[in-house]
Image (tube, grey):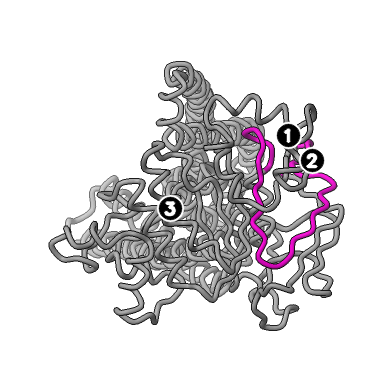
Amino acid sequence: MIDKQLFQLPKIKSLFKMLAGLTILQAFMILLQASFLTKALVISWKQLALHNILWPTVGFLAAFLSRHFINWLKDIMLDRFATQTTEDLRNQVLHKIYQSGSQIVAHTGSGNLVTETLDGMDQVNNYLNLILSKFMNMMIIPWIILVFVFWQNRTSGIILILVFPVIILFMIILGYAAQDKSEDQYAQYVVLSNHFLDALRGLTTLKMLGLSKEYAHNVQTVSENYRKKTMSTLTIAILSTFALDWFTTLSIALLAVFLGLALIKGTIPLTPALVTLILAPEYFLPLRNFANDYHATLDGKNAFTAAMDLLNQPTVKNQQRLAPFTWQQDSRLQLKQLAFQYESDQANLQDLNLKISGYQKIAIIGQSGAGKTTLLDLLSGFLVPKSGKIQLNNHQLPHLAQTNWQKQIAYLPQKPYLFSKTIANNIRFYQPNATDDQVKMAVQQAGLTEFINHLPTGLETKVGEGGRGISGGQAQRIMLARAFLAQERRVLLLDEPTAHLDIETEYNLKQTMLPLFENHLVIFATHRLHWLNQMDYVVVLDRGKIVEQGSLKQLQQETSGPFYDLTFHMRGEQNVEA
């Protein structure tokens, strides 16, 4: 229930000290409340004059209000701590994601990350609010009450001590069962999040391939599994709450029987018997509150553990092993026996050997899932290879997460991401300090001039988050304008940037892109074969391996082999001679 990593949180120790002090004070208020109430009831039972009950009543009210005022102070402290800690934790998680990029997405899953940073943090906030207060109450209040009860009547104290471990044991047994169920439920929730996010991302592709209904059935199956896990968890939670209430009620009834018999025999005075009976529910109350909130906090505990596990994952930070340089005609990059593996057993990239030099134009082709994007992520430094050697201009590097290497890269993905800013500021992505004239020149080179002139506010037009309000072709041209504006970045990585465009739009965009290729190293992952005519070198990937490579002319001379088979199957989409 208590994650040990809680004690690693900043300011947690001082918070525990303050909570402990307030809880001890609260426990004494409970004793005073019970004592004054007992005194008032005994005076009423003895039918003494009305003025005799006045001060015990005032004392009871003062103790009652003080108890709840202390509880309110604790809630305020915990709410502030939980809010601040959750916000700090969310920022750390986001910073971790930003630092690790594709590496952590590949390891954790995009749906899991979305769940963790949104719903997960809300659950962590609830967890911190509940668990710290309930845990402190359970660890302090019952024992102070027990000492007081022993002082009042030893037999009652023995009964309470004997019953308490039985309830604790029962809680542990049901707690483990509930924890297993809750972990299964949270894991299924993550699976559901991943499926839902994947469905949203690929909805267009699924509809185009006629698989949307089939995938909808898949999501429905996962949703049904999540429903079953949730109902199973709720069953355990309701059962344990009922059993705990039954045990505590039985224990109080048992104590009442012993006290009643002792009063009949005259072996115990009325005052200690009554104060003991009043304190018995208070003795069990922290335990009951802790158990009742146990199930409510399990999701929060799972979310907190997941967040801490994510933060504890090793991060390969951008390094400065590479001195500042500019990729030039005589620059060289060599990959030797490079391999990368995701969490699954199957390696995504294996034994990659590739030599890259100067202003080559290199095409990477292969079926979906062959590893094209993964290779680009390795070359951009977003992913770190598991093994192999990288040599850049005679420098041996463990990976390409090097700041000065990444400063040479301009990246054009399949789906360009535009921020909720003006078009001008989106174009300034690589060059924040670029002048208006430089931006206009980039706009002209990217073929955006006519589009911009038709906008009422021109370059100051604000686009929606993710490029809402902009067509796919115009979004790609804005990405091109970014690259034109950052001409000093001599390495262009393109991950099928025209894959989601129609042929006419792609052709027009292609005429704009070709001038950008000049004096640049271009690495172009594509499944559109007409791009191969603009490439100097072709790399064929299949199941994570380079199965063939060479110039287009060399590969076309082969009448069999991976390139021949691949282009034969792809020729229905595009013709190499287009």
Q: CA distance from mark 2 to mark 1?
A: 7 Å
**Residue 356 belongs to the span the image colors magenta:** yes
Name the residue carrying label 1: 563
Look at label 3 and name its amino acid.
Answer: Gln
Q: Residue at x 17, y 56 (%)?
A: 50
Relative to 354, residue 78 above or below? below
Name the residue carrying label 3: 511
Residue 567 x, y percent position in the rendering: 65, 30
How crowded is the residue under tag 1: few (<14 C-alpha within 10 Å), some, or many (20+)?
A: many
Q: Which mark is residue 339?
A: none
Q: CA distance from mark 3 to mark 2?
A: 29 Å
Q: Is residue 427 left or right of residue 198?
A: left
In the displayed orientation, state which residue is furthest to the left: 456
SS for dot 1: helix
Range covered by the magenta-colored residues: 342-371
Residue 60 x, y percent position in the rendering: 30, 59
Residue 37 x, y percent position in the rendering: 33, 53
In depth, the one of 390 and 272 nearer the eye is 390
In terms of sequence position, does the residue under pointer 2 or pointer 1 come before the other? 2
How crowded is the residue under tag 2: few (<14 C-alpha within 10 Å), some, or many (20+)?
A: some
Q: Residue at x 19, y 65 (%)?
A: 458
Look at label 2 and name its amino acid.
Answer: Glu
- Residue 444 seen from this side: yes
Name the residue carrying label 2: 548
Look at label 1 and name its amino acid.
Answer: Phe
- Residue 272 seen from this side: no
SS for dot 3: helix
Q: Is residue 461 left or right of residue 295?
A: left
Q: CA distance from mark 3 to mark 1?
A: 26 Å
Q: Is residue 346 left or right of residue 191?
A: right
SS for dot 2: strand
